[in-house]
Image (cartoon, helix red, strand yellow):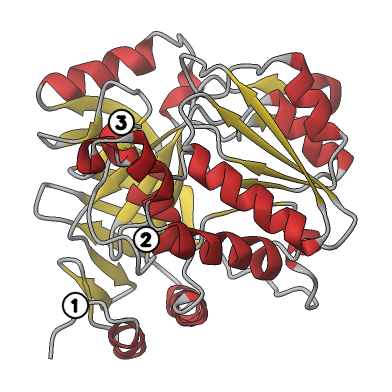
């Protein structure tokens, strides 16, 4: 995250930086804590943040928790050089003692051993890595959340119509095909935190791909992170994928950086495709360099590479060394023979209607 994304270059002084849209930020923080996370009076809520985290977000969230009557405990520590590196021991101690945890650290830990321990202990963690004030106001919006959820539900229904083959293309050179997983059986209604022990920022849905059937070329032309040396992509990075595994990486200098980053782990699992998703957060309309929102650019397709978290269970579990997310802009998506999105514009009738209701200027009349 750059200082400009936090507002320093825009406003030029610490005083203006610290008060930027403070009322709007308070509203988003309250909505997050009260409505989305359903924090209750008396609960112990841990927020952990590294030195790269926007303090305005941390302060607004802690205040919202306090107003509810819960106990906000904020843990700050130094920014680590890469994602998922073990934090200082007191961070883990606080996390495992909490009723609920919010991750704001820029060097996120969501695939780390600490998260695995929290999951086993039943401690829910919400991943909002790198959240800054502007992002929070745009992306956690009480005026648009219900409409975004309606779009997400409609999107799931459209995707689960797929029985045979999906396809994604884009002008930069993406052309992949994949088979569909059978739709999951819906469980009984439950509290969000009990149903999903971990969660993240809204506005992203799975394309339901069978990973071992993913074949073709992915061209990342939006952003990819990590490695931190790339972020927004200047020249498309092309990945040749065979049966769900990256076999070749081509492009310019950024492609070389990515190729070397994968290679230095010396572990074949870093090349495994992990998921294929679509972004539809109405607050995200362009690449900013913050991966949390970049992978939710409205209409994008995002591909995760590298197994997420840990492989195996119990004593046989092994830490997976990496996970990266790349963004494909202006995609076209087919569900079987149905074109649901054309060059970044949803054309499936229900999705088109709901996009218009959110005020997204991405439709064809």
Q: Is residue 12 left or right of residue 354?
A: left
Q: Are marks 3 and 2 in contact (CB under 8 Å)?
A: no
Where residue 70 appears, as percent x and y from the top left, is 82, 55
Q: Are marks 3 and 1 in contact (CB under 8 Å)?
A: no
Q: Which residue is mark 1?
A: 361
In the displayed structure, would residue 193 be above or below residue 131? below
In the structure shown, which secondary structural element does the residue marked by tag 3 occupy?
loop
Q: Is residue 80 left or right of residue 257?
A: right
Distance of label 2 from label 1 (alpha carbons): 15 Å
Q: Which residue is mark 2?
A: 279
Q: Nearer the viewer, residue 361 or 27?
A: 27
Distance of label 3 from label 2 (alpha carbons): 23 Å
Question: Of circles 3 and 2, which is in front?
Answer: 3
Q: Nearer the viewer, residue 239 or 40?
A: 40
In the structure shown, which secondary structural element does the residue marked by tag 1 occupy?
loop
Q: Which of the two labelled residues, at mark 3 and mark 1, occupies the earlier sequence position?
A: 3
The quadrant of the image that shows the C terminus is bottom left
Q: Give residue 358's quadrant in the image.
A: bottom left
Q: Which residue is mark 3?
A: 2
């Amino acid at each position: 995250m750059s200082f400009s994304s936090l507002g320093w270059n825009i406003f030029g002084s610490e005083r203006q930086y610290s008060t930027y849209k403070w009322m709007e930020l308070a509203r988003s923080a309250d909505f997050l804590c009260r409505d989305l996370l359903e924090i209750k009076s008396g609960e112990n809520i841990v927020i952990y943040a590294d030195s790269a985290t926007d303090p305005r977000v941390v302060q607004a969230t802690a205040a919202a928790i306090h107003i509810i009557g819960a106990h906000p405990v904020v843990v700050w520590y130094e920014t680590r050089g890469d994602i998922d590196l073990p934090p200082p021991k007191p961070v883990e101690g606080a996390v495992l003692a909490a009723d609920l945890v919010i991750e704001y650290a820029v060097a996120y830990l969501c695939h780390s051993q600490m998260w695995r321990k929290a999951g086993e202990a039943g401690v829910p963690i919400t991943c909002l890595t790198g959240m800054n004030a502007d992002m929070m106001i745009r992306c956690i919006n009480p005026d648009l959340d219900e409409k975004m959820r309606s779009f997400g539900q409609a999107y799931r229904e459209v995707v689960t119509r797929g029985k045979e083959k999906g396809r994604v293309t884009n002008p930069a050179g993406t052309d992949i095909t994949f088979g569909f997983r059978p739709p999951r059986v819906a469980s009984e209604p439950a509290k969000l935190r009990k149903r999903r022990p971990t969660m993240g920022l809204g506005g992203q849905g799975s394309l339901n791909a069978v990973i071992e059937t993913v074949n073709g070329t992915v061209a990342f032309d939006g952003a990819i992170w990590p490695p931190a040396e790339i972020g927004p992509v200047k020249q498309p990075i092309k990945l040749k994928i065979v049966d769900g595994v990256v076999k070749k990486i081509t492009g310019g200098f950024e492609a070389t950086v990515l190729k070397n980053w994968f290679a230095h782990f010396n572990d074949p699992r870093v090349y495994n495709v992990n998921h294929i998703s679509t972004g539809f957060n109405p607050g995200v309309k362009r690449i900013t360099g913050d991966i949390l929102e970049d992978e939710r650019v409205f209409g994008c397709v995002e591909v995760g590479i590298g197994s997420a978290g840990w492989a195996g269970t119990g004593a046989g579990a092994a830490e997976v060394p990496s996970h990266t997310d790349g963004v494909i802009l202006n995609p076209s998506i087919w569900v079987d023979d149905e074109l649901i999105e054309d060059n970044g514009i949803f054309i499936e009738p229900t999705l088109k209607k709901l996009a218009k209701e959110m005020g997204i200027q991405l439709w064809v009349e």
